Image: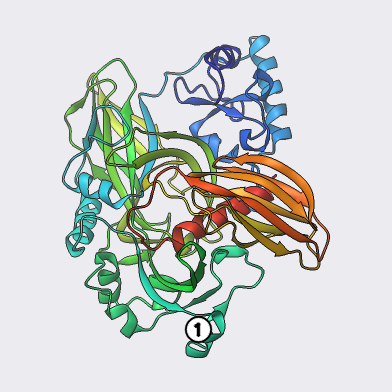
């Protein structure tokens, strides 16, 4: 829902459009942020609102003491920062604001292959900004090199493997596989993962352009180019489904928007630059260089897109702090485009790879009225960006989690109850204090009744996407669920969904631990 226009306007007035954290005047480059995260019960009230600039937004993001950039601002600290700054403004102790920035600088990461093909052809009609202009550079050329290697106009970054009767059969064939214990961590949805052989990958190199390049560059398979994950595909009646998982393909852009009232000519970008046409770990280091930009004047409210990095995220699922999200109208069929302002929490940022180099801008230089001016740019470190993604709506069962000292994934519930009432049951093992039933896909779960040891516990529960219930339980209790799930759309073609479900299960585990 977000803050009302009235609350946003009042915060802007009371803070004099300064950031409450760093006390800089930022003009339009300031946002109203929740002190207490909305997803954790924070209200859309004036008391829970704080003005922060884009640079500080990442550091004022959802509090996580394990965040790689250090300890972020806690809600208590943000509240104190707001109170302190409001007093300074009320006492008129703020300095006269300097000239406001001429440009709004934001990082956009495009995560959808079809969208990248459009951009590669110069089609920016679906890029979520007004009046975009694309700068074609070495990063852009590397993107088109990957696209040229790929035989299809879509890419799923995964492929079907074999079907198996059970985990015992699989481990007999692949004894070096890693069994996922506790169903938490990076591969929570999978029961078993393993590293494929080179011969296995050779079967897919002609079907996947990025994998083909990785093999040609002799990258090691383990933890780099591919894994194989196995999971129970209960809806299809498969005890253990094998899935080959490849690196996803992202492309990052610095979007420079003229927010002044005058046409401005960009001169150059200053930053750390490494444009080697090879695969390298994601890094913010490089040679400090200048990159010339087209000297044509940029009209007000016009944006320039500078490709800065082809980023390949890890094979494991990432934890993401989401600050806001908007959905487009459906693009084709049931496909949605989602734009999210978020922060990616990496256990190790070097688990990400780049191809074709990387540009980390630090400064924009531009010409106005015959004079050269400079404006700083915050770092591209994946902690403050806008993600652009598309996906086909699909749903496949609610999900069950067990909670003791930590939460772990168990399995899908009501797997054969799509659009019709059925039942499911399970026994509570030792050391489980509660269970969580969560709806985390594009569907609605309708639970008609829940029985604990044949005694009716609760009935008539509806769970929409992102909703869950938690129930306190005792060991050896028998839980019976009667209900159904109703997908938003009917999936026409069965396709590998293991890595997508691993993403949403892992994200739910991460979000739950923050509550």
Report if residue 11 is visible in the image: yes
- Residue closest to the eye, 57 or 414: 414
Q: What crowding class fits label 1: few (fewer than 14 Cα within 10 Å), some (14-19), or many (20 or more)?
A: some
Q: Is residue 459 above or below residue 29?
A: below
Residue 497: image x %, image y %?
42, 60
- Residue closest to the eye, 185 or 272: 185
- Residue holding disc 1: 170
Residue 371: image x %, image y %?
26, 23
The residue positioned 49% from the left and 33% from the top of the image is 54
Displayed quadrant of residue 85:
top right
- Residue closest to the eye, 331 or 304: 331
Displayed quadrant of residue 430:
bottom right
Report if residue 65 is visible in the image: no
User: Disc 1 on helix, strand or loop?
Assistant: helix
Q: Is residue 424 above or below residue 1?
A: below
The residue positioned 26% from the left and 34% from the top of the image is 304
Quadrant position of the N terminus in the picture: top right
219 vs 209, left or right, is right
Residue 211: image x %, image y %?
30, 69
Q: How many marks?
A: 1
96 vs 452, left or right, is left
289 vs 97, left or right, is left
Displayed quadrant of residue 77:
top right
Residue 390: image x %, image y %?
35, 45
Q: Is residue 35 above or below residue 10?
A: below
**Scheme by which the image is coloured:** rainbow
Quadrant position of the C terminus in the picture: top right
Q: Is residue 134 above or below residue 11?
A: below
């Amino acid at each position: 829902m977000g803050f009302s226009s009235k609350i946003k306007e009042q915060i802007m007035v009371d803070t004099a459009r300064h950031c409450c954290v760093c006390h800089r005047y930022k003009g339009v480059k300031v946002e109203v942020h929740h002190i207490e995260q909305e997803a954790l019960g924070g209200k859309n009230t004036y008391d829970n609102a704080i003005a922060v600039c884009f640079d500080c937004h990442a550091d004022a993001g959802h509090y996580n003491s394990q965040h790689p950039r250090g300890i972020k601002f806690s809600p208590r600290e943000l509240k104190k920062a707001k109170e302190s700054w409001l007093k300074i403004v009320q006492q008129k102790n703020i300095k006269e604001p300097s000239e406001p920035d001429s440009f709004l600088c934001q990082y956009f990461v495009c995560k959808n292959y079809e969208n990248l093909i459009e951009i590669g052809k110069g089609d920016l009609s679906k890029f979520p900004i007004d009046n975009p202009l694309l700068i074609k550079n070495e990063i852009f050329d590397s993107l088109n090199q990957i696209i040229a290697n790929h035989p299809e106009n879509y890419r799923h970054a995964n492929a079907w493997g074999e079907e198996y009767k059970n985990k015992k059969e699989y481990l007999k064939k692949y004894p070096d596989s890693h069994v996922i214990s506790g169903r938490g961590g990076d591969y929570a949805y999978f029961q078993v993962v393993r590293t494929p052989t080179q011969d296995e990958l050779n079967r897919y190199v002609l079907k996947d352009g990025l994998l083909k390049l990785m093999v040609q560059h002799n990258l090691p398979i383990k933890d780099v180019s591919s894994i194989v994950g196995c999971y129970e595909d209960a809806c299809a009646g498969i005890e253990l489904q094998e899935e080959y998982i490849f690196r996803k393909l992202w492309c990052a852009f610095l979007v420079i928007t003229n927010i002044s009232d005058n046409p401005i000519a960009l001169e150059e970008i200053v930053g750390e630059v490494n444009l080697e046409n090879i695969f390298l770990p994601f890094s913010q280091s490089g040679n400090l260089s200048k990159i010339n930009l087209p000297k044509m004047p940029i009209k007000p409210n016009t944006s320039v897109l500078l490709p800065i990095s082809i980023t390949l995220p890890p094979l494991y699922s990432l934890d993401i702090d989401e600050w806001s999200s908007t959905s487009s109208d459906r693009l084709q069929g049931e496909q949605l485009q989602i734009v999210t302002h978020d922060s990616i929490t990496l256990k190790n940022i070097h688990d990400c790879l780049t191809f074709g180099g990387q540009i980390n801008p630090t400064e924009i230089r531009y010409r106005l009225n015959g004079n050269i001016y400079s404006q700083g740019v915050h770092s591209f470190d994946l902690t403050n960006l806008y993600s652009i993604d598309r996906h086909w709506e699909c749903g496949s069962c609610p999900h069950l989690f067990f909670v003791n000292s930590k939460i772990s994934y168990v399995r899908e519930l009501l797997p054969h109850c799509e659009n019709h009432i059925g039942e499911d049951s399970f026994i509570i093992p030792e050391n489980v204090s509660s269970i969580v039933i969560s709806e985390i896909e594009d569907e609605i779960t309708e639970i008609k009744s829940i029985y604990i040891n044949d005694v009716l516990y609760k009935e008539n529960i509806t769970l929409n996407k992102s909703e869950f219930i938690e129930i306190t339980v005792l060991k050896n209790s028998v839980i019976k669920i009667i209900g159904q799930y109703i997908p938003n759309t009917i999936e026409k073609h069965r396709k590998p969904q293991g890595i997508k479900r691993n993403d949403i299960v892992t994200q739910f585990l991460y979000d739950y631990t923050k509550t």
